[in-house]
Image (cartoon, rainbow, N blue to C red):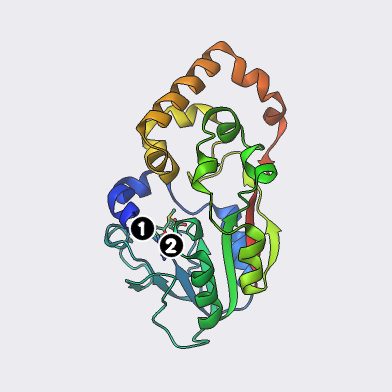
Amino acid sequence: MSGAQLYDTLGATYTVTRRTEPRIAAQIWVALGDARTVLNVGAGTGSYEPADRDVTAVEPSALMRAQRPAGAAPCVAASAESLPFENQSFDAAMAVATVHHWQDPIAGLREMRRVARRVVVFTFDGSETAWRRRFWLTRDYLPEVGDLLVGRPSLAEQARAIGARIEPVLIPWDCADGFFEAYWRRPEAYLDDRVRRGISVWTTVGPEAERRAVRSLRDDLVSGRWAERNRDLAALDAADLGLRLLVA
Ligand SMILES: C[S@@+](CC[C@H](N)C(=O)[O-])C[C@H]1O[C@@H](n2cnc3c(N)ncnc32)[C@H](O)[C@@H]1O
């Protein structure tokens, strides 16, 4: 299933838990520099689009496009791998939480580089040490997530494709955007079906793995095992779980 088809299937409840997290948005907007015209690729419902710039959105899923609020930036039905724009037609191109859904991430990143003078990509380091082991949810409950990354380009390969530098993005403990890692200090949230339906990973791993992980997490929360294992998190206000900004 393509990333667009996936979102045409599961995107109906996206805005229940997914919205702009202001502290992460601030970091993305600084990285956009003085860009006046901005292309937002894999734009979804419009989160992270800066209100003070001239934004054009690109989004392949009709269900996601239909949920863009009235007055949101104009949105073109297209995919990252084939952007229907001339070379260098935007000051900047941004992509947030979407590259891992693209059929050919390197082709999509090169397209962004082709159509814009500056490129800003919010993505993650999926390597064993940076993410899978560091985040208790993948490490202790949902190791299947590792399988989803097999054959995907590494963060270094993505950065190299556009000549980007890599910046860490810390996740605040009360992150407003309910993406996969957002509830690292609020584990009970993952027991809530509405939260899980806003995170594609839960659908992609399949119902059996989802049921097992949720059951196991619930047991550990009740028994105090989760709290014991993750004692160090209680004192943190923000965590580095491998989320990264590529800036080129
Ligand atoms: C997790 S959502 C992120 C949406 C938005 N950027 C945000 O931050 O809320 C991922 C989006 O990527 C889109 N997508 C999937 N495949 C794509 C592709 N090949 N090119 C562009 N966007 C794609 C999906 O349709 C979905 O809207």
- Mark 1 Cβ and ligand 1 under 8 Å apart: yes
Q: Position of residue 86 (x, y in %)?
A: 45, 88
Which residue sits at x=63%, y=58%? 155
CB under 8 Å between callouts 1 and 2?
Answer: yes
Near-viewer residue (98 or 71):
98
Q: Is residue 192 visible?
A: yes
Q: Residue furthest top?
A: 223
Relative horizontal placement of residue 43, taking residue 135 as reference (left or right): left
At 60% from the left and 49% from the top, the residue drawn is 126
- What crowding class fits label 1: few (fewer than 14 Cα within 10 Å), some (14-19), or many (20 or more)? few
Task: Tell me which residue sits at (50%, 15%) in the image.
Answer: 219
Which of these two is toward me, 137 or 176?
137
Q: Where on the picture, by quarter, is residue 43? A: bottom left
Q: Is residue 91 left or right of residue 233?
A: left
**Mark number displayed over residue 103:** 2
Say few, some or many: other residues with alpha carbon within 10 Å of mark 2 (under 14 / 14 to 19 / 20 or more): some
Mark 2 CB near ligand 1 (8 Å cut): yes
Residue 180 visible at all = no
- What number is the disc on residue 2? 1
Identify the image quadrant of the N terminus.
Answer: bottom left
- Residue 41: give x, y in percent of width and height: 45, 68
Q: Amino acid at mark 2?
A: Gln
Return the x and y of residue 145 as percentages of the image width and height: 51, 40
Instruction: Say which of 117 and 174 sits in front.
Output: 117
* Amino acid type for the residue under numbered disc 1: Ser
Residue at 52% from the left image edge and 13% from the top image edge: 222
Label 2 secondary element: loop
Q: Secondary structure at mark 1?
A: loop
